[in-house]
Image (cartoon, rainbow, N blue to C red):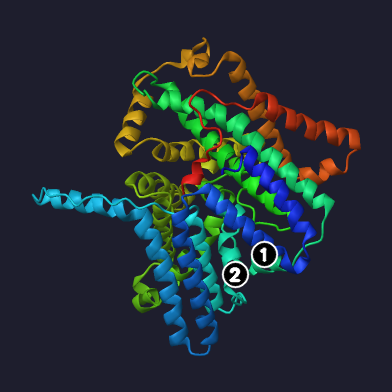
């Protein structure tokens, strides 16, 4: 069951009705039952064994950590067991073949031709997200930041709360535990806000992202034919497709949760207005970035190893090395393939590192060229620079492998065909002229909404307007989805890119 389907929307409506008619003390039970139904309908049922094992061991370890909080060695033992079990399960299910393939390459280098066979393991829905969530939960219990749940069924709801199982966000127990279990009175405004958020997410997914996906698929299927400027159109289109797909998914799940009165953490904050790559990742996939910062970067940069090395270590070196670990993990988190490690990891890390190391040079150039950094034109340049760099990084994400990515990059810089912007070539990428024009209008709308969102909470601002205006706004959005939703031949409008994680 995917979250843009009629089945999901129907069951969501039923679950909201049931949620508010049962007594408040049993509302979390209703959510748990619906989360279980959602998991069964959305994935291969037997993979629930992995999720169940994670829930049971996490609950056990959390209580043992809390009970032995004054015996740090014993408490840490259970923390390590919980982390290794959950991280090991993620590694086994998601990265086994990545390890096997690399071992086979090494063996081949030494003349050993007998290859280790790949394994066929099916991972449960959302394992990359809930694994990080339970690790953070165990660490926070160990640090005294949060207390363990009272019973295993509450742990099950925290780990398997159905909106988060799709593509996150990765929530902390201290911010979610109380909301899930305290119960909520019916609030028409929250329900309406949640439905509005869902509408906006569906619009981004099936009106914008679906059309962008057609352009991207057409060009990347034959980079020899679609070379030169086409490659960069595909790179920019995929960057926008990824944003509208992933943030659209977040809008839907955050909106669905808001209908119950439960507020999930935001995962996007208008990333295309970023003025540096570092700022971009403070606005993009915010909960993953926060997790890596708090549970990887800070511990690594503050390890006692640096103190032992004393003055021999540059003060910034621990931070740079910790960042390297974070970005390697960030790349690997996206999948068991070197293209993710290089494109999503090392490339982004080098962009940030070089930006920091060359900062004195940049300041000198700005002064020499007398660039006024407070102007709108300079801010636009900075944002466009970030967009270009991240579009290049995501070429690794989208294309099959590193070889294909380098091949596309080569065809993009060795061929010159700017005239495709002036003739009808852009109408031959799988979309009709009408669809291309509609896509352009929708992207302008998306830009204006994000631009206004930098200063205002648009839902609240719209809510302040007269009833007729409000109905026009939300009615237009609804009918745009019904009329302009794109379901091209062979295109699965219900799938989400990050749903594979």
> Label 2: which residue?
153
Can residue 20 be seen at all in this image of the molecule?
Answer: yes
Which one is in front, 492 or 313?
Answer: 492
Q: Is the residue marked by circle 1 packed among few (<14), some (14-19), or many (20+) residues within 10 Å?
A: some
Above/below status of 226 relative to 278? above
Residue visible at 64% across and 49% down in the picture: 253
Residue 119: give x, y in percent of width and height.
28, 52
Which one is in front, 195 or 428?
Answer: 195
> Label 1: which residue?
29
Please tell me which of labels 2 and 1 falls first in the chain. Answer: 1
Q: Are marks 2 and 1 in contact (CB under 8 Å)?
A: yes
Q: Is residue 449 left or right of residue 424?
A: right
Residue 485: give x, y in percent of width and height.
63, 27
Residue visible at 60% across and 19% down in the picture: 435
Residue 213: give x, y in percent of width and height.
51, 29
> Dot 2 lies on which element?
helix
Extreme residue in the bottom direction: 71
Residue 454: give x, y in percent of width and height.
71, 44
């Amino acid at each position: 069951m995917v979250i843009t389907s009629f089945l999901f929307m129907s069951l969501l409506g039923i679950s909201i009705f049931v949620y508010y008619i049962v007594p408040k003390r049993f509302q979390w039970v209703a959510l748990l039952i619906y989360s279980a139904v959602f998991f069964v309908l959305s994935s291969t049922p037997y993979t629930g064994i992995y999720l169940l094992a994670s829930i049971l061991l996490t609950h056990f370890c959390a209580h043992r950590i809390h009970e032995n909080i004054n015996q740090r060695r014993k408490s840490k033992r259970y923390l390590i067991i919980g982390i290794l079990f959950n991280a090991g399960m993620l590694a086994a299910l998601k990265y086994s073949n990545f390890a096997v393939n690399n071992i086979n390459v090494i063996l081949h280098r030494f003349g050993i031709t007998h290859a280790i066979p790949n394994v066929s393991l099916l991972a449960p829905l959302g394992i990359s997200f809930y694994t990080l969530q339970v690790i953070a939960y165990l660490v926070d219990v160990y640090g005294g930041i949060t207390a363990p749940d009272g019973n295993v069924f509450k742990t099950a709801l925290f780990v398997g709360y159905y909106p988060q199982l799709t593509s996150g966000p990765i929530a902390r127990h201290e911010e979610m535990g109380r909301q899930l279990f305290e119960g909520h009175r019916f609030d028409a405004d929250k329900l309406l806000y949640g439905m509005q958020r869902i509408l906006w997410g569906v619009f981004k997914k099936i009106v914008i992202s679906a059309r962008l996906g057609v352009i991207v698929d057409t060009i990347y299927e034959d980079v020899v034919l679609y070379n030169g400027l086409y490659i960069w159109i595909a790179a920019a289109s995929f960057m926008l497709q990824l944003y509208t797909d992933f943030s659209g998914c977040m809008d839907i799940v955050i909106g669905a949760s808001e209908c119950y009165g439960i507020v999930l953490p935001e995962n996007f904050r208008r990333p295309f207005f970023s003025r540096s790559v570092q700022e971009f990742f403070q606005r993009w996939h915010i909960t993953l970035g926060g997790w890596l910062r708090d549970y990887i970067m800070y511990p690594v940069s503050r390890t006692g190893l640096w103190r032992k090395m004393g003055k021999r270590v540059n003060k910034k070196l621990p931070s740079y090395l910790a960042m390297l670990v974070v970005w390697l993990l960030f790349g690997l988190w996206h999948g068991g393939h070197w293209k993710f490690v290089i494109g999503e990891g090392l490339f982004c890390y080098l962009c940030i590192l070089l930006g920091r190391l060359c900062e004195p040079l940049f300041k000198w150039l700005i002064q020499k060229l007398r660039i006024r950094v407070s102007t709108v034109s300079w801010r636009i340049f900075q944002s466009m620079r970030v967009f270009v760099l991240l579009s290049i990084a995501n070429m690794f994400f989208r294309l099959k492998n590193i070889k294909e990515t380098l091949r596309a990059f080569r065809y993009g810089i060795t061929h010159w065909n700017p005239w495709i912007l002036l003739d009808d070539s852009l109408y031959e990428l799988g979309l009709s002229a009408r669809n291309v024009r509609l896509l352009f209008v929708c992207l302008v709308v998306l830009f204006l909404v994000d631009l206004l969102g930098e200063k205002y909470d648009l839902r609240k601002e719209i809510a302040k307007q007269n009833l007729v205006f409000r109905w026009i706004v939300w009615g237009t959005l609804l009918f745009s989805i019904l009329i302009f939703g794109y379901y091209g031949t062979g295109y699965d409008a219900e799938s989400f890119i990050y749903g594979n994680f």
